[in-house]
Image (cartoon, helix red, strand yellow):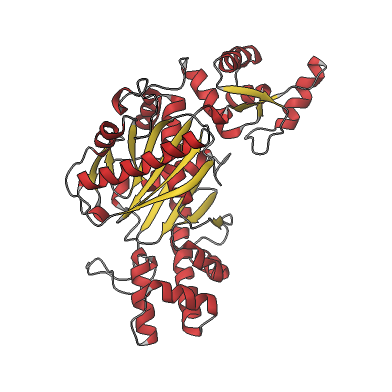
Amino acid sequence: MADFDKAALLPPQAAQPWFDGSEWTHRLAADILMYGPISRTGLARLHSLSQGTVSRITADLIYDGVITSTDEENSHSPVDEQDAEDKDSAGRGRPQTNLRINDDANTFVGINLRGEVARAMLVNTSCKQQGSVHEEYFTDTTPENVTRSLAKLIDQCCDEAKSLNLPTPRMIGVSIGGHIMDDGTVDQAPFLAWNHRVDLGGMVSELTNIPCYIFNNLDSLLRYQQWFGAGIGETDFAIVTVGAGVGYGLVSGGEVVQAPGESYGLAGHILIDPDGPACLSGRRHRGCSQCLTNDSLAQEYSEMMGSPKTFDDYAHDVEQGVPQAKRLVQREAFRMGALLAVVANMAMPRTIFISGESCSILKYAMESIRMGLAEYRPSRAPEVEFSILQDDDSPWMMGAATEAIRLFVLGPKMALRSALTRE
């Protein structure tokens, strides 16, 4: 590993939060991280706290170097900042400054592990990328080899932090498609052919001397969008992902909805097209949401063209306006609309975000998505807002880093208590 002072770094089980303080101190620091720059009055209104309480808490955070004052304006506060500032300024006779997190006080590494490739990114406390994306390919997916591959990426990120004169990474977050226990143990990871428990977090921590936590990739993506992405300020939204599989996540009342079986692909076999193709998993039904996956679309397109085609062939032909590809993407988009209608009707989010490595192809048939939604949504129900997010790997890496940042700011105990409350 790079030559860093690691003596103060502890294994994941004993990883320390950024600062000591009450639950409200950690909560307000998280709010400033998510919504900042934000005023003290805005924070007080957000939690119905007194101005005096907020002033005392934020003074401690400034003293500890967690937050700083700034003249920057707020862009995504969940409260009416201007109204709050006008009332506060009228009473005090002077405009107030806003508060923001001390971005560069810490760095973190976010790693997304998918199939036979892992990608890593160094970020600061606000989850902004620092430096380059690092990749490590491997064919041996045994836990020991995967651990070594992750350690190589972490080493590269540590070297990069040093070259940029940034602090040592405080924590490592790794996101993986699978069922994760206790933010460290992989219980099942189909894409790695892991069907037994692997203490991946402990293995990486032992090899690198940096606290490492493991998270489900969809949970991590959802958390990133909530804290730093498209969902900032949204209290009720859902994410649907498409690519190698179909994923679904929900934020309700400002909290990520978690349940014991959520990471087993619960959205993978929802009926969305009675006349759709047979399920690729070998089950006897047809027309389930698996028909939105890359492999299913490649097979369907091959049948339409009369010769073997890959998903990349299909995506290329959609861009080129090939008639058969155009018909299939319209069909795919209508099916996506049907799936969004199920989510909207049952979970009732205000907004749905579509993400995943192959979501961008749906931009060629937005009207078909709306048609599918309308077909399976009550006519008098409010229109469902949806948008298609970027489809590169950055949000998946940032999602893993977000989970680590959350633990660092809230503290593992508070973060765990919050998750257990939601279950």
**Residue 154 versus residue 192: which sits nearer the camera?**
154
Say which residue appears at 62% left-offset and 35% top-offset.
Answer: 78
Can the viewer see residue 276?
no
Dividing the image into 4 quarters, which one contains the C terminus? Answer: top left
- The answer to which image quadrant residue 159 occupies is top left
In the image, residue 327 sits, relative to residue 343, either above or below, namely below
User: How many numbered badges does the structure rendering display?
Assistant: 0
In the image, residue 296 sits, relative to residue 86, either above or below, namely below
Left or right: 19, with 266 as reference point: right
How far from the left and from the top, in percent, is residue 244? 35, 61
- The answer to which image quadrant residue 308 occupies is bottom left
Say which residue appears at 65% left-offset and 31% top-offset.
Answer: 37
Q: Residue furthest bottom?
A: 306
How far from the left and from the top, in percent, is residue 331? 46, 74
Left or right: 112, with 206 as reference point: right
In the image, residue 207 sits, relative to residue 64, either above or below, namely below
Q: Residue furthest left?
A: 196
Left or right: 359, with 100 as reference point: left
**Residue 33 versus residue 89: which sits nearer the camera?**
33
Say which residue appears at 37% left-offset and 39% top-offset.
Answer: 155
Say which residue appears at 35% left-offset and 60% top-offset.
Answer: 245
Can the viewer see residue 127?
yes
How far from the left and from the top, in percent, is residue 305? 39, 86
How far from the left and from the top, in percent, is residue 171? 39, 32
Dividing the image into 4 quarters, which one contains the N terminus? Answer: top left
